[in-house]
Amino acid sequence: MTILRLPRKTGAVSVLLPACLVAGFAGTPALAQQPVDNQQEQTSQSGEPLELPTTEVVASADASAGGLTEPYVGEQVARGGRVGILGNQDYMDTPFTSTAYTSQLIQDQQARSVSDVLQNDPSVRVARGFGNFQELYVVRGFPVFSDDISYNGLYGLLPRQYVASEFIERVEVFRGANTFLNGAAPGGSGIGGAINILPKRAPNEPLSRLSLGAEDGGQGMVAADIARRFGEEQRFGMRLNAAKRDGDTNVDDEKRTLDMFGLGLDYQGDNFRISADIGHQYHYLDQPRPSVYLRFVDPIIPSTPDAEDSFAQPWTYSKEKQTFGTFRAEYDFSDSVTGWLAAGVREGEEDNRLAVPTYNGAGQTSTSMFENVREDDVWTAEFGLRGRFQTGAVSHQWVTSAAIFNSEERNAYATSAAFAGNLYTPIDVERPPYAADGSGGSLSDPGLINRTRTQSLAIADTLGFMDDRLLVTLGMRRQGFDVRGYDYNSSDRTSSYKRYENTPVAGVVYRLTDEVSLYANYIEGLVKGDIAPAQSGTTPIVNAGEVLSPYVAEQIEAGIKYDGGVVGGSLAVFTTDRPFSTVENGVFGEGGEQRNRGIELSVFGEPLYGVRLLGGVTLLDAELTKTQDGLDEGNRAIGVPRTQANLGGEWDIPGIDGLTLTSRVIYTSSQYAALDNNVEIPSWTRLDLGARYRMVIDDHDVTIRARLDNATGRDYWASTGGYPGQNYLVLGAPRTLSLSATVDF
């Protein structure tokens, strides 16, 4: 029996197959959808060369037969990505908009975390969690908590506050409501979009990569990326990533330490595929610069401090340790039906001692210490079936799935009395004692305070007409919430919440030409309802403890997509209505509404050989259409700019092989910092510059990279709010020079 070795390619698995089976490739589900490569010569029994088509099996983060979507020209973004339970889709064939940022872009920009990658997206702005250092992403004017980003389609598995880039193969940004596609985010965000992280897999060629880096503040970095495929057919893959960062940042007295480890495994069978990941991250911030609270009554916007200055107290820190694991398998029952199963777990520990100042005017601040300890246990699972069939001239691509999520949070906290300070001439104070009545639970043994369980069933069919030039997607998800709250000290149940809701979807995309698609969708977002507090401000609540029904956000969107071969992009128009709670005559209930309407343009590609572009513009009108007593009705929401614009460029210098210059401009217009719209933070523009040089030394590929973020040294408030209803300020990062060298052995 003659054996045929398929050609090796980066990101693909070479498989040894009997030559007599080549003619039957089309009937093998794992291979039938793969592109035919250049012909390969092989000797026949008579000694004459035979020209045989070759096929490659693609290693996949989500264990799918098709593997990752191909990079678009320029390799900064992909041609598409995961569209929830609908699976991987080319961007021209879906009635939604999304962008998948590639590992090439992540490496070339020396991205440290998810937020560094999302700085490229005109629909996203990066903020911070309320009172802590959690990354928070604002998509189309609505928050996505870092708790609510998904890992290979599963919620709750990634480190909760900060995700190191070394874990990431791609960052997929879905724009718009998405509960049908992904299920409701368990943390209560995600109305404006979703973020999914794809893990790394072993490429076809052996990989041994070492990276060293440094920042001018004193931060150092070392990372290793090792991958191999094993077995006679190279069906089994293993990829190991490990990194350490340590040292001072460019903010005075601030230090950062990060240790991470990630192991990705996969197996590619003829009709069975499996992948698994194990990850661990330790992240420690010493004396981190906090946000700045504003008073709710007559807030005052402080003038911007120097971006390198710190107003942190010397005894503050934030420490996080997270360990997680995932498993995903896919099996082809036939040529037309595939099933999948995915599951994951995470254990997390956090320890924070914070001191966030409230600005009172004339430089004066009032600050209290807040210390807390948190432990998380999360497990989640999903399984489903997808397939295809034909009814006359109409094609059908159907999918059904079920998902469950469970988390338990243990927490304890302690606070201190307030102490005075100054934002511009900070005063170090001794760590204050805990207040007698300002604690909950035991810091040494935190108790259970929250248990959240979600479950859902979903079904959809994409109907294809006119030889699939017209695709219509119809579907429904039945989503359930079961949330229980417990007292910090007694562990008694204080609240209970169990609600179900149906969320439909209807989308249509029409391939007008090979280069142009028109699309529209109606889709809903869903977040768990609030539990009525004992009081709101100084107003007692007469229905304290009552659980509100889930909030249903409604979105309508239409747009056009373009694929010119070397330049692609999309233009979208959308409106999203999101309810929120209010208090009327002492009764807590659903009565408010925020409407975000916008126009969104994105572009990417390589319009000229050696010149790459990535960016776009988002125009947003975030209006409070219903408010308590109509007081702020018609005003703009806190922290949502009218204009967001990004433009990044790369230029391969002619005549100097391997040298590339890069630049990126980020513009964010002014943002209101109060519901009455009486105060706002100014607009800001940031310029980032960079260069890289690729060369070969002793047969080893070497890449030197340099990046200067905030090249002009602009001092600015980067965001206000982020967490709903809050108006705290986050100071933008100072000018930062990053250098790195990567060697492939």
Image: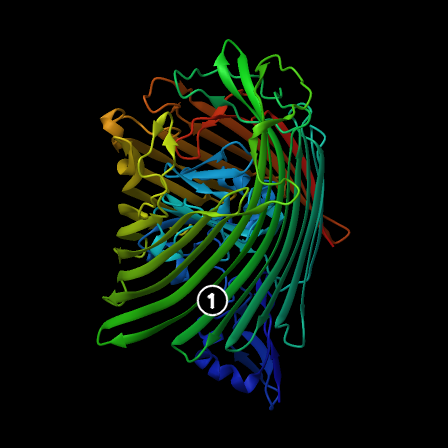
Identify the image quadrant of residue 476: bottom left
**Residue 596 seen from this side:** no
Q: Quadrant of the C terminus?
A: bottom right
Which residue is labeled 1 in the image? 66
Residue at horizontal 69 percent and vertical 51 percent from the top: 242
Near-viewer residue (210 or 353)? 353
- In the picture as drawn, the residue positioned furthest to the top comes out as 362
What amino acid type is highlighted by mark number 1? Gly
Task: Give the percent coordinates (x, y) of residue 594.
Answer: 29, 35
- Circle 1 packing at 10 Å, graded few (<14), some (14-19), many (20+), is many
Residue at horizontal 50 percent and vertical 17 percent from the top: 359
Q: Is residue 580 left or right of residue 60?
A: left
Residue at horizontal 63 percent and vertical 76 percent from the top: 233
**Residue 307 seen from this side:** yes
- In the picture as drawn, the residue positioned furthest to the right comes out as 698
Task: Give the percent coordinates (x, y) of residue 143.
Answer: 42, 39
Seen in the picture, residue 301 relative to 53 is either above or below; the reply is: above
